[in-house]
Amino acid sequence: MVTRAERVLIAGAGPVGLSAAAYLTRRGVPVTVFEAEGSLPENLRASTFHPPTLDMLAPFGASKRLIEMGLVAPKFQFRDRAHGCLAEFDFAVLADDTAHPFRVQCEQFKLNHLLHDWLLAQGGADVRFGHAITALRQNGDGVTALVETPDGGTEAVTGRWLIGAEGANSVVRQALDIPFEGFTWDERFLVVSTPYPFETAMPDLTLVNYFADPAQWFFLLQVPGLWRAMFPTRPEETEDEIFDPGRIEARLQWAHAKAEPYETAHTTLYRVHQRVAERYRTGRAFIAGDAAHINNPLGGMGMNGGIHDAFNLGDKLAAVWHGEADDGLLDLYETQRRPIALDYVNSHTIRNKQNLEATTPAAQQAFRDFLAEVSSHPQKTHDYLLRTSMIASLRAAAKITA
């Protein structure tokens, strides 16, 4: 059966897909969202919402609720074992640049529920769970998605455009035969969540802390009720070795030694990639978020960059939909967003990792000197926070007009 609809089709009901759906709905563009899972995705990977992302989500009531459900993090630190706190940065210096001069620490799946609830409240929301896009075809008038339905059947749904926002293994990107260029780090990242109150043991911590160490760097981030500790693993370690309770305990004791063993809530291991798609558009189909770019999590730029993709593309699709611009405007989406993934997100997250794992005295001193210089000059602090908050990347994209 072929269903024809004057709407935008969206693959994926995660933060990026639902952000695109909410933005387009608010602009009067009908959407249909296809989610392969039987309910809203609830993975725990991303948990940091940056200032401009909160600005974007505010009209949907999501920022207010994320603040209520999460933890407001106005500051973050770089630390090491020998010197303690190397530098602390306060987003308050961005008070004139954003309505939200802070990060919010809150699990990304909570945003999925907030945006889905907002869509339902508008009436006419079409979010289909248990529906997986398996292939697509297109012509000059529209794009047709072949969708596997919960009963095992296949439905062909045609819309005016399609957005693939279903993650790093995007079927849409693969169907469009778009190369996913880049590399995968040799080590995998282990995330351990624990209710242990690090803030009591180390009262000078902020909610977000990067610990540089040549033997084993790590990252401590607080979310409601838990601290999440992230460690690199060695390439030769097997999964059984990594998840061995004794090894997990040893890593946590490395982060902070204490007499009693740690209680752990959950553990996650994942491969870390730095990849950017060769293109973001083929005809009437687009990719966004992890379908278009993936990076290591140091800096919290992956999910946020994907939401920024969604709003950028949504704005252009709405303008073309309403006859305010011609189809050529849609090419500007890739022209604006792909360089950001390459020049801001990829380069920044790679540099973060290299700084934290620096092994030579010269590299370690260069990192300390960089932090000292940036933190001691108000203008350099401001510029640095514009970049780490992703405000600078949005401004750079806005300057690209052709």
Image (cartoon, rainbow, N blue to C red):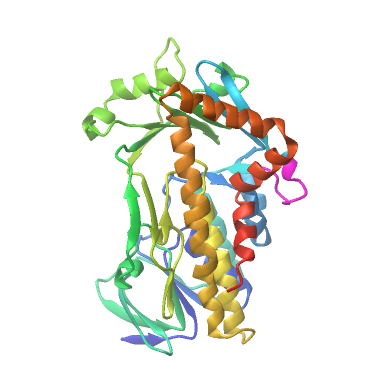
Q: Is residue 30 visible?
A: no
Question: Can you give x and y, in whole percent of width and height, for residue 207 in the image?
Answer: 59, 32
Is 391 left or right of 348, judged from the image as shown? right
The residue drawn where x is 52% and y is 58% is: 340
Residue at position x 49%, y 86% from top? 6
**Nearer to me, 306 or 68:** 306
Q: Which residues are magenta?
A: 93-102
**Quadrant position of residue 394:** bottom right
State the residue at coordinates (46%, 50%).
346
Vertical placement of 242 versus 269: above or below? above
Residue plotted at (72% across, 34% down): 377
The reply, left or right, for residue 97 in relation to residue 66 is right
What quarter of the picture does the N terminus occupy? bottom left
x, y percent for residue 304: 54, 53
The answer to which quarter of the image holds residue 154 is bottom left
Question: Can you give x and y, in whole percent of width and height, for residue 341 in the image?
Answer: 48, 56
Task: Give the camera-side residue of 81 and 18.
Answer: 81
Residue 5 lies in quadrant? bottom left
Q: Residue furthest front?
A: 362
Asked if the magenta segment contains residue 181, the reply would be: no
Q: What secondary structure do most residues of the magenta stretch adopt?
A: loop
The answer to whether residue 225 is visible is yes
Please tell me which residue lies in front, 122 or 257: 257
Is residue 98 on the magenta stretch?
yes
Residue 321 placed where, x, y %? 57, 83
